[in-house]
Image (cartoon, grey):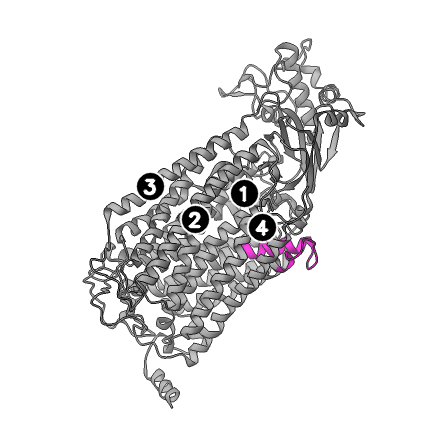
Amino acid sequence: MNTGFHLLPESASTAAASLDHLMLALTLLMGIVALAVTVLIVMFSIRYRKGSSADRSHAPTTGRRIEIAWTVVPLLIFLGMYAWAAYDYMALYRVPPDAMPVFVVAKQWMWKLEHANGRREISELHVPVGQPVQVVMTSQDVIHSFYVPAFRIKQDVVPGRYTSIWFTPTHTGEYALFCAEFCGTEHSVMRGKVVVMPPRDFAAWLQHGSAEPGIAQRGFDLFRQYGCSGCHSAGSSVHAPDLHGLLGRTVHLQDGRTLIADENYVRDSILLPKKDVVAGYAPIMPSFAGQIGEEDLIAIIEYIRRMEGETGGGNAGPAR
Amino acid sequence: MQAQQDDVAVEATRNYLTEGFTLWSWLRTHDHKRIALLYLVSITAFFFVGGAAATLIRLELATPEADLVTHETYNVLFTMHGVIMVWLFLIPSIPSALGNFLMPMMIGARDLAFPRLNLASWYLYLGGGIFTIAALIAGGVDTGWTFYTPFSTLFSNTNVILVLLGVFIVGFSSILTGINFIVTVHTMRAPGMTWFRLPLFVWANYATSIILVLATPVLAMTLLLLGAERLLHVGIFDPALGGDPLLFQHLFWFYSHPAVYIMVLPAMGVVSEIVPCFARKRVFGYRFMAYAILGIAVIGFMVWGHHMFVSGQSVYAGLVFSLLSFLVAIPSAIKVFNWTATLYKGTITFSAPMLYALGFIGLFTIGGLTGLILASLAADVHLTDTYFVVAHFHYIMVGGAVMAYFGALHFWWPKISGRMYPEMWGRVAAVIIFFGFNLTFFPQFLLGYEGMPRRYHTYPEQFQVLHLLSSAGASVLAAGYLLPLGYFLWSLLYGKRAGPNPWQATGLEWQTPSPPPKENFAVTPTVTEEAYAYQPATSAQVPQ
C-alpha cells in the first residue's frame, strides 16, 4: 500500500482500468466546457467593459437557432456519456461464472469474511491475483458499504438482504478497504485491507490454519441442527417443498406471483416464512427470525445451493 | 454636518422602517418587508452557527488523527452542520428573506396574499429552528442530516426524535411560504404585468414554491414514519420488523433531491436580475430562461434514485435515474449559456453584485458538470460517498446558492436599508470568498477521486496534504463571510444614501423610494413593457 502523497489513486483491478478511461474522458470533456464558458465570460467582460469602444450594434437578445443548437448538442453528448457509463456499470453486475465466492458479514465496526473452504478473516481479505472474486454481503446491524478505491468498486451492505459485487485484481499488493456508508461512532476506523497474492501463495494461505469445515459442510450441520431436514427431505412425512436445485429455479407462489429463487428469497423464507408461500403448500413453517445468526444463514444457503449439485449441477459460487 | 442633515432626512422620510420602533412592532408586523428582515436576521444567525460547526470540522481534519474532538463529537458536528445549513439556512435563505421582500414589489403589489400567514411562517421557522438546534446540542444527534435507517431508528442512542420534530415544524414554514408565493403571483400582479413580463427572479421563486408545496409534505410523512418506527416499533424501514431500509432512502431523496433545486432555482433568479443590470442589456432568451426554470422544477422530481446507485436498488432503476439526471442538466446548461450570451455586446461594470453573479456562473458550472460525472453510473460507483460528492454539492450550494445570496444582498441592500455598502470592501469580500471557496473545495474533488470516504473523522495519512489545503481555504472563506457582516452593519449608520435606483435597474422595485414606504407604491403601477428594458447604446446613465 502506497501511503505517501500521490495525486491519482492506485489502479489494481480490471474495473479500475476501464473506470480510469471513463474518468479521463469525462474530465477532459467537462474541462473543455468549463474552460469555454470561463474564456467567454472573461473575453466578453474585457471586450464589452464600460468605456470600451467595441462595436455594440445589433446586440441580440434572443436567437432561436443558437438556443436550439446549445440544447441539442449537449443532449447528444450527454447521451453518449450516459451510454458509456451505463455499459461499464452493467458489467459490474454481470458476474463471471468462474468467480470465487467470499461471504461478508459487516457489523459496527468490522468486516467478517469467510471463504468457501471455511477459512475466516476479520477486516482483511486475501485473494489471488487474476481471479474474479465475488463478495456476497449482508449486515448484522446498520447499512455499511464495501469500498476498495484501488479496485474502483463500492457496494452498500444492507441488513435484511444480500448484495454483491465482483472484481478481478490485476496487481499483487495490499489495498485499503473502507466502509463508505456512515455507520455510527467508529465509522472512520471501520477500515481493513485487501491482500492480493500470487495464486500459489494464496492456495497455500487458504489451506494454512483452516481447521474449520467448509462453509457448505457447516451449512449441512446447521440444516440438521435446526431441524430443517426433518421436513425438507425426500423421506419426510411433512408436505414441504423440495430444495434440490432451488437457487435459480422459478417458483410459483400461493398468491399467484412467480419469482426466481435467489439468496434473498431463501433468506426471507427462513426468517419470514409467511411472506412467499409456495403454491400447493400449507404455511406451516415456523419462523427462525432471531435464532440464526447472519454467518450461519449464509452457510445454510450455501448448503442449499450445493444440493443443486446433487441433482442438476451448476456453478459452485452463488448465482449473480 | 453632512451626517446631521442625513439624520434629519431619515426622520422626515416615512418608510417601512420608521413605521414603529418597538420590538413589539416588529414581532407582530404583517408587512412583508419587515417579515423579510426578521428572516434575514434569524437566517444570518443560523448561518454562523452552522459555519462554526464547519470550522471545527475543517480544524479537526487538518491532521489524520483524532486530536481536537472525539468520534462522537465529530459525528455530531457534521450532523449539525448539515441540518442547520440545509433546513435553517439554504432552503429559506433567498426565498423567505429576499423573495419575501422583493416579490410583492416586483409584481407591483402592496404585500403578499396572506400577510398573517407570512408572519406565522416566520414563527414556525424560528421556533422550529431554535428547537432543532437545542435538540442537536443537548442530545448530540449523530445520524448525519440524511437520518438513514436502521441507524437512526435502532442504533443511534440520541435525540433523533426531537430533531425530526424540529425539522418537521420548519417544513411547515416552507409549505406556508410556498402557498403564499403561489397565490400572490397568480392573483396580485399589477395591471399589465403579464406572465412573460415577470422578472425571472419571480419565475424562479414561483417554481421553487411549487416544489416546496409538493415535496415538503413527503419529508413530513417520512419523518413521521421514522418517528413511528423509533417510538412504537412499527415495522416500516427496519428489516428485523419486516421493513425495508431502502424505502427510507427513496422517500428521503424524493424530497431531498428537489430540495437541491429549492436552493438553487432562486439563486438562478438572482443572477438573472444582476447580470442584465450590470451588462445594461436585456437577458438573453427570456422565454427559454423561464421555460428552463420550469423544466428544472419538473424533471428535478424524477431523479432522486441517482443518490442510490450502489445502495442495492435494481440495476435497471439505476439506468433510468441516470438518464433522467443527464436530462435535468440540459435546462441548467441553457441558463449558463444564456447568461454568458447576455454579456455579449453589453456595457459591463463590475460592482460587487456583478462579481458575485459572475462567480456564481463559474462555480455553478463546475458544480453542474461534476454532477454529470456523478450521474455517470460506473463513475458514481467509485465516487459516491467520497469527498468528490462533498465537493460537488458544495460547488452547487455554496459556490452557487450562497454566492448568489451574497450577490442579492449587495444588489438589494440599498433598497432594503436605503444606504450603500462600501463598494471597495464589497469587491474585496467577493474576491476573498471566491478564492477561499475554491481553495476549500477544489482539493476535495481530488480527495474523492483518490478514494477518501466522506464523514470520516480520522483518515489515512496519504490524504493529509489535500485536507490541509482544504482547511487553509476554509479559514480564508470564514474571513470572507465575516467581512460583509461587518460592513453591512457599518453602512446602516454611515453608508452613503442610495436613492431609489442606484443601479439604474429596470424592475418595479426600483421605482419606489429606498427604503420603500409601508404600502410599497403610492399608486399601483401599470406595467407597459417587458422586464429588462435595458438599452446599452442609448442609455445616458450607467451604474457607478
- Real-space CA distance between mark 2 and mark 3, rounded to the nearest whole angstrom: 17 Å
Q: Is residue B491 above or below residue B271?
A: below
Q: Which secondary structure lies at badge 2?
A: helix
Q: Which comes before the other along the chain, label 2 or label 4?
A: 4
Q: Are marks 2 and 3 on the same chain?
A: no
Closer to the observer: label 4 or label 3? 3
Identify residue for label 2. B368
Magenta part of the chain? B59-83
Say if residue A289 shows up in the picture: no
Identify residue for label 4. B144
Counting from the top left corner in percent of width and height, residue A277 is at 57, 21
Q: Is residue A293 above or below residue B179?
A: above
Q: Are marks 2 and 1 in contact (CB under 8 Å)?
A: no
Which quadrant is the N terminus of chain B positioned in? bottom left
Q: Amino acid at mark 2?
A: Gly
Q: Amino acid at mark 1?
A: Thr
Q: Given the image, what chain letter belongs to the residue carrying mark 4?
A: B
Identify residue for label 1. B384
